[in-house]
Amino acid sequence: MNTRMKIMVLIASAIAGPLQAQPGVMESLREAVASRWDFQKRYPAAQKLFRNEASEGERMLLIGQLRPLATPTTAAEAAATTPVPGSQSQSALGIMWANFALGVAAEKSRPGAGEQDLAAAALQAKGNLGLNFELARILGQVGMYQRAHSWQMEVHRSMLEKGYMRVPDLAKLELWKVLETIRQGHFQVARQGMEFAKRLDPLCPWVPYQNLILHFREHSPLGWDLGFVWTSLGETLRLLRYYDVQTLFLINVSRCLRLALGIFGALGLLVLFIRHFPRIAHPWTEKMPEAVELRVRYLAIAMVPLSLAVGGAGYVVLGLLGAMLLWKHCSPDEKAILKVVVMGIALVPFLVMWEQSMGRHLDPRFAVNLYHQAWSRGYERSLSDRSLSFPIHGHEDSLYRALALSLQYKKQGNYLRAAEYGRDASRIDQGNAFALLNAGNLDMAAFEYPKAVSIFERARREAPNLVETWFNSSQAELYNNNSSKHKKFLDEAADLDAQWVTQWLKDNDENFPVYPATRKSMDPMLRMGQAWQASWRALLNLDFLRVPVHAGIQDIQGSWLLGAVIAAALALFFRFRHYSRNTHGWDLFECKICGRIMCRTCRKGVHCQNCFKTVAGVHENRIRLELVSRLRNRSALVRVRIASALNAVFPGSGRLYLGGGGFFLPLTTSLLIGSSWGLNHAVMEYPSFVLGPLRWLPLLPLACLYGVFNLKQLRTPLDLGGVTPAPTAPERAVTR
């Protein structure tokens, strides 16, 4: 009997070759939306009907217009006009939309009158995920929630039947609809939509989050259930154990931190450059007139942010040159910022390499990306072409490409091709747990349960922590009539991940109560341990030397960037290894009154030319000291005003300019800016609209920081005590 079944499966798989033209989920959804708009152009009243705005007269007129179209009354007649996936004709889709519109209009006029038309539309749309999703959305929009729920279950059943474990694209659309429903106050409908979104993507971390938002909107603050809130938060955190959720979360956190620390490093270099600019620029500007010198100074300061904005290699070049230029003039505390900048630049290739290895299923250059698409999203039309033309870079690429192709053909029902690529994967790595599980699943599909039992036993030895090995072993033992081992292995799988096993058993019981057994086995998911192992292998293989680092308008190879950092560090070491302020002194003189860098003509005295002219003709000590105090206060006032302006632009940067410590405030501001940038981009595979207004949450403390600093500066008088140089002992004796 098993041999006969196997022969039938092989014949069916040989016939299944034309299914390779089957479109993907989003492509079928786009075709469904396009056909709906074509139908609404021919019958404008249908647009009002689908928006639940049609009056009774308009519904009756539409029924009269659509009734002459043939409505199949039997399953055979409906199947004859069913749009075939991959070759949908406009006539078939037009008849389906006509039946659906007739059913909706009749049901809105008299409940139960459109049962036959809706049943015919359901038969015609059967198996088309995108079309069924669009029909379920319209039914919910017109207020037929019970029928919408049954259509949603048809979408879920078709998804599982085709081998889709999750369809994140449709889950995104459903969550967007849930947000609109919550804003309208239809909380029960929103709860139904969230249940559907969870079925579309069981690994979506935003479903429990949206459930929490729904609870807050539905109840007053006094009616909030704190136990429910804690449970929802726990469910969100539990999803972080899955590879997709965890890696995408870590990658976005890493990108936010990279941006924030980059802002902090650029700010530190810019502030230190402004602080020490007179001492740096004096050798080039001492021969210029004072007015020209000021213009050159302002132009040079303006060129720094302009170069950073233009980018390219400027990020790295300006950072390293700035550190080398400032090293001579900075104090030991300020040199700590320069060291952090240089080390941060050197760490960029390592961080980029880590992000790429952690999120390999997002990077189209790795074959694991193909496997992830075949596992999570099912068959897409471009996957086969990209798999066959994929450039092989190593052992792992070959393995995952073969697994992706095997999984893809298995979902199409083409078990001959699936077994062929499965054997290729086994030849590449005989002990790989994914290859063993794939081979065992194919044996389950061919009803060779004893062979599947032995293969799953090898998989359990190779990967005892994979829930798929224990779950599939339990299913193989069940069909092999070994109930004791079936229960034992199922309990082991539940111990590893009870939530995932419960979800699978529920889906199997609801949608596949009987054969085929191919729906009873799990395809293996990627695990975080594999991502960490890939990161370690990338480090050992020196991949950070080949990784491209985005720096403005062009990319820099990691080896070039590290070479520049090493060259800069060696230049600083050999140039300043014997340099000491105490032994070598300042290279330039500065005025003891106003702190201005003195030019060559003034080096014979202790004052610059302006200060010397001011006090030279005054012989009384008290008047002379008052003039000196005014000059010092005027110089300090300029520095304090520059610091206030820097604080207004970036809170905390003024203290860095004045030479004080306090890195906490500028670092906090940089982190808030990085978090705001991250929350307004794709987070965890879902767009920023899922967060709603919370995506702007980091801007609130940022605005508070700006407001507090600026209000404090407006209300607080200028304090020159910490900036003005302390008077010398003779000056204190005279003024006493």
Image (tube, rainbow, N blue to C red):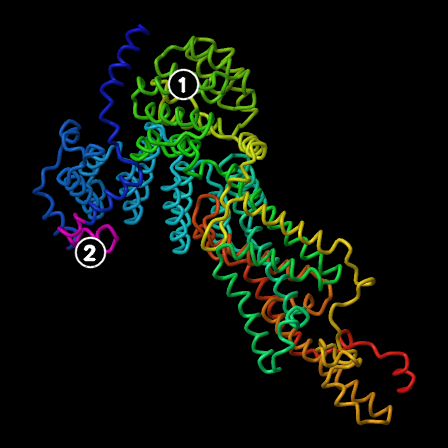
Q: Which residues are magenta?
A: 38-57
Give the crowd class for mark 2: few <14, some 14-19, many >=20 residues within 10 Å: some
Q: Are marks 2 and 1 in contact (CB under 8 Å)?
A: no
Instruction: Check the image and report above or below for 177 versus 463.
Output: below
Asked whether, in this view, residue 198 is left or right of residue 708, the answer is left
Asked whether, in this view, residue 607 is left or right of residue 11, the answer is right
- Front-most of 210 and 605? 605
Which circle's residue, 2 or 1, is located before the other in the chain?
2
Horizontal and vertical percent for residue 440? 42, 16
Horizontal and vertical percent for residue 170? 36, 41
Nearer to us of marks 2 and 1 is 1
Type of residue at label 2?
Ser
| Secondary structure mostly taken by the magenta-highlighted segment of the chain | helix
Instruction: Check the image and report above or below for 198 versus 551.
Output: above
Disc 1 designates what residue? Answer: 441
Q: CA distance from mark 2 to mark 1?
A: 54 Å
Give the crowd class for mark 1: few <14, some 14-19, many >=20 residues within 10 Å: many
Horizontal and vertical percent for residue 42? 13, 51
Horizontal and vertical percent for residue 559? 55, 43
Query: If the image is split into quadrants, where does the N terminus sit?
Result: top left
Asked whether, in this view, residue 16 is left or right of residue 732, the answer is left
Question: Which numbered dot is residue 55?
Answer: 2
Type of residue at label 1?
Asn
